[in-house]
Amino acid sequence: MTANNDTEQRLHTAAFRLAVKKRSDHLMNYFLIGFFLTGLALAFFYDTWLIALGVGGLSLTAYYSAKIALPDSELYQYVLSAVLAIFMAQYIYQMHGLFEMHFFAFIGSAILITYQNWKLQIPMLVLVLIHHAALGYLQDIGFDKVYFTQLGYFALQSYIIHILLSAVIFFTCALWGYQLKKYSEIQIGQIIAMGKLQQEAQLAAEAQKKEQEQQAAALDKAVAQGKFEMASDVLHDIGNAVIGFGSYLTRVRRLQEQESPENLQNLARFFEEQQPVLSAAIGGVKAGAVITMLSGIAETQKSNQEEMRKSITEQLNIIAQIQDILNIQRQYISGQETQERKLVSLRNIINDCLSMLFASLDKSAISVSLNVPDELPDIKGDRTRLMQVILSLLKNSLEAIDGNAKEKAISFMAHRQNDQLLLHVRDSGNGFSQTVGDRLFERGFTTKPAGTGLGLYNCRAIIESHAGSIEVSSEGQGKGTLATVRFKI
C-alpha cells in the first residue's frame, strides 16, 4: 500500500511540475521580449544599437536553441538564468555604468521563482560575481569604455558589500522557490489523501447498502424458516460492523480536526505584512503575484478540509440511521413473522406498534386516539411487514409534532368501504407543502436533517405487495398530516 501511495504521489507531483513548467515557460516568453525591447529603448541614450541587437539577439537565440534542442531537460532553464544575468550586464554597459541597471539582476532572480527550483539562482549569481569582479577590476586598472560604474574607482569594500547584498537577494529568491515547491508537494499529498478518503467513504456507503440488502434477505429467510437465533446473530454482526465503521470515521474526523491550514495562512499573512519590503526588492507586481498565489493555496486547503469534514458528518448520520433500522428489526424478530400470508387483525398490529413506541409518545406528551372497531374483518398479510408500515407512519407523526405545540395528537381511524379496509392516520404536526407532497414517495427524498429517504418508499412497496395503496396528504405547512392506507379484504 505504501509503494502504491508513493507511486501515486510521484505521478501527481510530476504532473504538477509539468504544469508549473509550461506556465512558467509561457511567462518567460513575455519577460524575454520585454528584456529585449528594454535594451532597444536604452540604445537611444548612448547609441548602443549594436550591443542591444547583437547581445540581446544572441541571448534570445541561446535560450530558445537550448529549449528546442532539449525540450525534456531542465538545462534550458539554467540557460535562461544566465541570459537574464547577461541582460543585466548589457544594460549596465548601454547606460555607461548607471548604478540602477544592477537591479535588473534582482528582477531576473524574482522571475525565476515561478519555476520553484532554487538551483536556477546559481548561474545568475555566478555570472554577476564574475561580471562585477572582471569589469570592476578592468575599470580600476585604467581600461576605458568598460562602463561598469560611473564612479572613478570601485573600492574592494564596495565590491564586497555589493556582492553580499546581491547574494542575500538571490538566496531569498531561492528560498521562496524552494518553499513554494515544498508547499506544492504538501498540497498534492493532501489532495491525494482527501481523494482516498472520499473513495473510501463511497466504498463504505456501497458496503452499507450491500449489508442492508443482505440483512433484509437474511432476515426474510431466517424468519420464514423460524430460525430466530440465525437472524439475531446476523443483526449482531452487522451492528458490530456498523459500530466499528463509525469508530473508524470518528478517528478520521479527529485526525482531520488536528490538521490546521493556519501555518500556510500565517505564511501568506507574513508575506502580506512584508509586502513593502518585497515590493522594494522585486517590484510591486511580482510581490503581489507571490502573495496572491500563497493566499490562493491557503484558501484551497481550507476549502478542502471543510468539504472533507462535511462528508464525514454525513457518513456518521447515515450510520446513526442504520443503527436505528437495526433496532427496529430486532423488535420485529421478537414477533411470529413468516413469509406465509395469514389473516391478521389490524387493530392488534396497531396496538403492538403503540406498545413499542409508548415510551417516546409518553415522553413527548402526545395523546393517541384509536377508533378501530373490533368487528372489522381481518386482512391477509405479512404481520411483520405491516408492522413496519405502521411503525414508520407512527414515527413520522411523532417526529413531525413540535415539542412546544399546544396540540399534540395522533389518531387512528379504520372503516370498511366495499371490498377495502381503510386506515387513516392523522397527526397535528408540521404538515408540508404541495411541492414536498409530490416527492414524499421518491427513494432518497427526505425533509429530515438526518433522514434516509427510505421510510415511505419502503412503506409503499410493502402495501402494494399486499394489493393495497397508500397516500399521504397535508393541507399545508403547520396543518398536520393525513396518511390513508387501503387494504384489500
Image (cartoon, grey):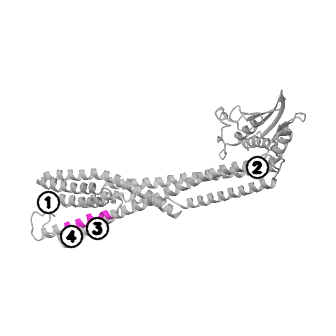
What is the spatial separation of the Cα atoms under label 3 and label 4, in whole angstroms?
12 Å
Q: Is residue 159 left or right of residue 170?
A: left
Mark 3: few/some/many CA within 10 Å (<14, 14-19, 20+): some
Marker count (numbered) = 4
Specify which label sits upstream in the sequence, 1 or 3: 1
Q: Which residue is mark 4?
A: 159
Label placed on residue 265: none
Q: Which mark is nearer the camera, 3 or 2?
A: 2
Label placed on residue 167: 3
Specify which label sits upstream in the sequence, 3 or 2: 3
Q: Which residue is mark 1?
A: 96
What is the spatial separation of the Cα atoms under label 1 and label 3, in whole angstroms?
24 Å
Q: Which residue is mark 2?
A: 219
Q: Quadrant of the C terminus?
A: top right
- Image coordinates of residue 25 in percent, x first then y, are 31, 53
At horizontal 83% and vertical 46% (from top left) the residue drawn is 355
Q: Which residues are magenta?
A: 119-132
Q: Is residue 467 above or below residue 196?
A: above
At horizontal 45% and vertical 55% (from top left) the residue drawn is 298
Kind of residue indicated by mark 2: Leu
Q: Secondary structure at mark 1?
A: loop
172 and 277: which is toward the camera: 172
Q: Is residue 100 visible?
A: no
Residue lying farthest to the bottom in this orientation: 156
- Image coordinates of residue 398 in percent, x first then y, are 75, 43
What is the spatial separation of the Cα atoms under label 2 and label 1, in whole angstroms?
94 Å
Q: Is residue 204 left or right of residue 50?
A: right
Query: Does 148 lie within the magenta span?
Result: no
Q: Quadrant of the N terminus?
A: bottom right
Kind of residue indicated by mark 1: His
- Image coordinates of residue 288 in percent, x first then y, are 35, 53
